Each structure stands twice: as structure tokens, then as C-alpha cells.
Image: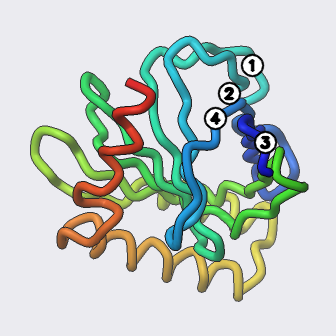
Amino acid sequence: MPSDVVRVIYRKYDGSAHRDYPARRLAEDDLGVWLGVPAGTESVYHGRPSVEQIPFVLLVPRHGWWTGMFNPPPRTSEVYCDIATPARWEGEETVHLVDLDLDVVRRRETGVVELRDEDEFAEHRARWHYPDDLVAEAQAAARWLLGALGDGSEPFATSYRKWLALVV
């Protein structure tokens, strides 16, 4: 039986800390593992202690080069996807991801979908010598998400709401 608590660890490509927080396993389905993070959860962000002010649900796909964060109001991003290496699970209790800088975001009020942090991706690609295959996978994931967040594809349309309701 899987553990109820999963530690989510994001690092940058050079191994530096990015995000680290506990989450509650909500479900596992054909899309991946759904994790809930309630408000008040203690976390680490860029190596500094933090506390999550707004709850969210994280979808960790089985093989995708991204994770999806689904947010309630008042957060201005309804859906925030990090482009990341495929999840590497350490047992059932810890998931490791490498954040690859690019983000695809859908704004709550307007529904506008945008690609963010291309400059950071280019800078880190040069500094840390991202391999060409990693660059290709990251860019392909970003292109796919730009379409999926805008065209009504699940899980980005409505299916995430049942999981988000469990942590709000």
C-alpha cells in the first residue's frame, strides 16, 4: 500500500535546490499521481523555508516532461506547468524532478496560455550545457502544453477540480 505522504523534490539541472515539500497522495490514475498540498504546508523554495499560503494539487505524470499545478482563487494562475525531467520515484514516498526552467501557465481571468522563462532556459542551457536531447524534450513538452491548456484537453479542462476540492 502506497504511503499517504509523498515528499516532492525539485532540483535545478546543476543539482541546486529548487522546491521541496510534503504532499498528500490523493489518487493514481492513467494520467499519473495526484498530490494535494493544503495551505499552511511547510516547504522549501530556492533553499529557503517557506509556507504555502494557497493550497494546490500537483499532477506528476508517469512519463511526461512536465508537472501540472492546479490552483484555486485567488491565485492568478489556474494551471501552472513546470517543464521538468520525467519523475524519478524513490519507493512510494519520494519523487525527484529536475526543473528545466520553462513554464506554461493558464491565467484564471483571461484564459490566456503563455510560455514563461525562455530567457532563463537559454541562460541555463548555455551555463550547464543541457544535452540536445533534453532541450528537444523540454521544448516539445512546452509546445504540447501550450496547445493542451488552451484547447480543452483533460486534465487541464475540468477533471482536476475533483482533486482540488479535497485540499481547498
List the residue tagged with mark 2.
45
Amino acid type at circle 3 is: Ser
From the viewer's perspective, is 115 left or right of 41?
A: left
Q: Depth check: give the residue in front, 106 or 36.
A: 36
Q: Secondary structure at mark 3?
A: loop
Q: Which label belongs to residue 48?
A: 1
Residue 18 in percent (x, y) is at: 72, 39
Q: Secondary structure at mark 2?
A: strand
Amino acid type at circle 2 is: Tyr
For marks 4 and 1, the one nearer the N-term is: 4
- For the residues labelled 2 and 3, the Cα–Cα distance comes to 24 Å
List the residue tagged with mark 4.
24
Question: Tags 4 and 1 in contact by the CB under 8 Å rule?
Answer: no
Q: Residues within 10 Å of mark 1 (few under 14, many from 20)?
A: few
Q: Residues within 10 Å of mark 4 (few under 14, many from 20)?
A: some
Amino acid type at circle 4 is: Arg
For marks 3 and 1, the one nearer the N-term is: 3
Quadrant of the rendered image containing residue 152: bottom left
Amino acid type at circle 1 is: Arg
Above or below residue 32? Residue 167 is above
| Discs 4/1, front | 4
List the residue tagged with mark 3.
3
- For the residues labelled 3 and 1, the Cα–Cα distance comes to 26 Å
